[in-house]
Image (cartoon, coloured by chain):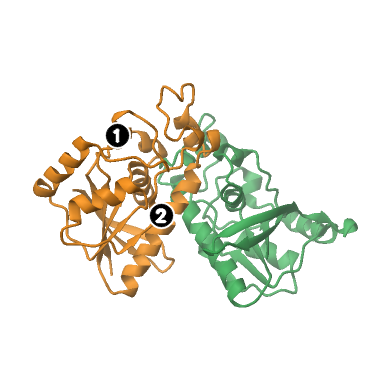
Amino acid sequence: MEIVLIRHGYSTANRDGLYSGWIDVSLTEEGEKELEAYRKQYHYPKTDRYYTSDLKRAIQTCHILYPDEKIVEKSSQLREIHYGDLEGVVWGERPNFSFNEHFFRNERVYNAEVFTEFSRRIYQKLEEIVWDLERDGLESATIVAHAGVIKTFLILLENRPFSDFSRLNAPNGLGYRLVLELDENKRIKLLERHELELASHV
Amino acid sequence: MSKKIVFIRHGKTNSNIEHRFSGWEEATLSKEGIEELLLFKETLAYPKTDLYYSSDLKRAIDTFNYLFGDDQTLYRIEPGFRETHFGEIDGKTSQEAQGIHMRDEFLKNKSPFGAETVMDFSSRIYMSLSRIYEELTLLDLKSATIVAHSGTLKMLRIILENRPFSDYFSLDMDNGRGYWVEIERDDFHRFKLLNIGDI
């Protein structure tokens, strides 16, 4: 089976350097244009189903990249990390503070979500999506979500050190194509991971 | 409907006395450990539960038999509740495994010497807990006891209480003792901790 993970386009919070987890910000005009260009430049594989987080920036991204496709579910389980009291705060205001450091020690700061809560929330949704594909005899789904969601999926599926979170790449509007299968316990096993290919190479 | 789950750590083994890393290696309950269990059986208030489960390692099954074997039988052995797999240092003393900073690596989700990572370990035991919760639901029962290991008990507590991972190295989990939780699941099948207490 194949799962395509796509990060939303450049948002107003990305532009303004804000912690944006659950705050519902829009794409910038620049971000929308970039997605239009990517749609021609990159090969976004067609899939049987399309899922998004229920936040505006993800839904808008899906509409621009896949104008002809219907979203089967806009799920709150696929939202970004909830940054608690940091939501909407400018990153640069806390120069010596690293959210990720606390996050990966599973320490709660600023009432934000902790890693065990977040990873369970999103991984359970991924399993549901894959199980539903299998039940319905389908092969593939696209998930349009957030950087934290995509990177955490990769850490869990590839069993990587937490420190890879800051090293893994999840640029706006792009993502990965995963080839996976279910083992005998219905657990997801990752077989291959590919970056999106340029349209000219397909 | 919520469920009550009681977690008990196996009794003291020879390997515990020798301060060995015992993960998937079998270890035997020590004479002292057995005596302690027989004393606990008389003095500690282990809550009675509908079903009883154990990790598949001998020290856990033996502990079940000493504590509850008189009037209970094991409903099922659940290998998913085994201790962390320590890889190459399994069965070694900390001295023999010198220079290995298991602790730091474990907290970073790294896998030194073929050991299980913290994420592998926690998803394995969380899955086993989900399976037991489902069994209880199907059978319309309310409670279960699980006899397992110190790492298993500490990690489940960290997950259920969303504690810092570093608590893995500071939480107490004495042999033959443990804790109970009252949990329920929401529409997303996520556990919600309602109550927790020591034995």
Q: Are marks 1 and 2 on the same chain?
A: yes
In the depicted view, which residue is nearer to us: B118 or A43? B118
Q: Name the amino acid, label 1.
A: Asn
Q: Residue at x 31, y 45 (%)?
A: B59
- Label 2: which residue? B79
Q: Is residue A60 above or below residue B104?
A: below
Task: Say what amino acid the circle numbered 2 marks.
Answer: Pro
- B8 or B104: nearer the eye? B8
Most extreme residue toward the right, as rendered? A200
Between residue B127 and residue B55, name the one nearer to us: B55
Examine the image and state in which quarter residue A182 appears.
bottom right
Q: Report the chain shown in green.
A: A
SS type, badge 2: helix
| Residue of label 1 | B14
x and y percentages locating residue B32 in the rendered image = 19, 35
- Mark 1 crowdedness (10 Å alpha carbons): few <14, some 14-19, many ≥20: some
Q: Indicate the quadrant where residue B175 lies.
A: top left
In the visual, does A198 lie left or right of B114?
right
Colour of chain B in the image: orange
- Numbered disc in front, either 1 or 2: 1
Q: Chain of mark 1?
A: B
Chain on which label 2 sits: B
A71 with respect to A102 (left or right):
right
Q: Residue at 33% of width from left, 71% of height from top?
A: B137
Relative image position of residue B159 (x, y in whole percent): 39, 49
